[in-house]
Image (cartoon, rainbow, N blue to C red):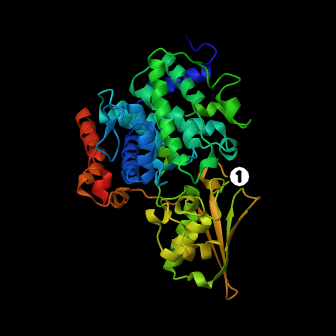
Amino acid sequence: MTTVGAPLTHAFAQAIITSDPTKDAAAMGAARTAIIDFLACTIAGAGDRTTDLLADAVGATLPGDAILVGSTRRTDPLVAAVVNGYAGHVLDYDDVHASVRGHPTTVIIPALLGLAAERDFAAEALLASYVVGLEAMARLGLSLGSKHYENGFHATATLGTVGATAAITHLTRASVEETTIALGLAATQSSGLRLQFGYDAKPYHAGMAARSGLLSARLAAAGFGGAPDFLDNPVGFHSAYSFGVDRLQAVTENWGAPWQIVAPGLTLKAYPCCTASHPVASLGIELNREELAADAIEHITFTYPPGADAALVVTKPNNGIEARFSPEYVFAAALIDGALRIDHFDERPVEPRLMALAERASRRHDDSAPRMSSDPKTRFVILDVALRDGTTITRRFDGLPGVTDPTTKFREATAGHPSFTDIPSLVRTMNSAADLHRLLALLGQDAVQNLH
């Protein structure tokens, strides 16, 4: 079947399969850095109780050669994609991208690692296909506008399915026709609701998108049929998901010029909680260093632009998982403890000493400010602290904090265990198929045993 009558889907597919990011040193370097960050999150997440629960439920005992990161088990590639995607996102410590308004790497890399069990390819090819998958995911995010996320969809899941498929079709050098079918199959599996934030289902979104992306490419390669016009069809992806605010041309506009992994680029998380809470976390740590005592505070007010706290769905968390989505609790932990650790956000009940301050915080919106969008300039938080002595402190944070070099994050997330020490240096230099095989061998070790 041809894509006559589907010019935009055809152009999108053509851009995906003909791209060559290997010629762009900045893009390839950014990809290496992002993968180090992702692997830090995934190795740490492999030890989470719910990762094991998911692995057992989805059939990790099935035969296959695909690795489960942080485990000696091998399994079916589709199962591995689910589990690795989940492990990468379960701690909410993985990267984000403004154009996606979500987490691209924890979807795309698990799909590519699943493919590595079926095909022999070079590490450089994996890096390049990851860049292309992220480009597709980000361009699609730009084309949808803000309503997709604000109306309840989790873009990591909905856009991730297409991004993972794009990465696979690029790596396998699929034809344009095959790619349009694969993308359409991905789009019809595109799902994930923000109502799951604070539950185990939220990181499952990343895993199911990785699996669906790999499966979509597999089905199309096998000759399975599907609509070849998911972008052009009047009852296609945008008519269903954009709520009338789409900008269709953005899916191919300025493709790779620059690559989205370069500009606006990824934000590598500094804290293991929802990205939207990171500005108040940084402000809390700053005030801790200035020795502001929690007992001196009467009330705290966070002011956001419209839409900026859409992901922060919890005000009074019951446990650390819910607390990832509560700026009130995040600020309290940052101010009182002077840092945010993974154990601040585990399954245990929230700490009363932190909730005592969190309950004195509230939010408001500055309706005169531009609505938050993919433009980082629209993101800010204003912090007003009313003290018991009648004075006030006002601080503002624009944009997002992040880390530029995840080396320390990797070391801390993997507890500095020697089994994983060589991974960052290998990722920074890997190019050949042999390099990728070595990486897979290092990843296929037992994280639970090594980290404890």
| Kind of residue at disc 1 | Arg
The percent position of residue 176, horizontal first and vertical second, equals 49, 18
Labels in figure, total = 1
The percent position of residue 17, horizontal first and vertical second, equals 45, 25
Residue 122 placement, left or right of 285 = left
Q: Residue furthest right?
A: 368
What residue appears at the point 35 percent right and 41 percent down from the top-left corner? 68
Secondary structure state at the residue bearing disc 1: loop
The residue at which mark 1 appears reads as 371
Residue 25 placement, left or right of 192 = left
Say if 381 sits above or below 7 in the image.
Answer: below
What residue appears at the point 26 percent right and 58 percent down from the top-left corner? 417
Q: Nearer the viewer, residue 71 or 401?
A: 71
Say if 197 sits above or below 127 in the image.
Answer: below
Residue 413 placement, left or right of 304 = left
Q: Is any part of residue 105 visible from this angle?
A: no
The percent position of residue 244, horizontal first and vertical second, equals 74, 35
Q: Is any part of residue 197 visible from this angle?
A: yes
Quarter assignment of residue 21: top left
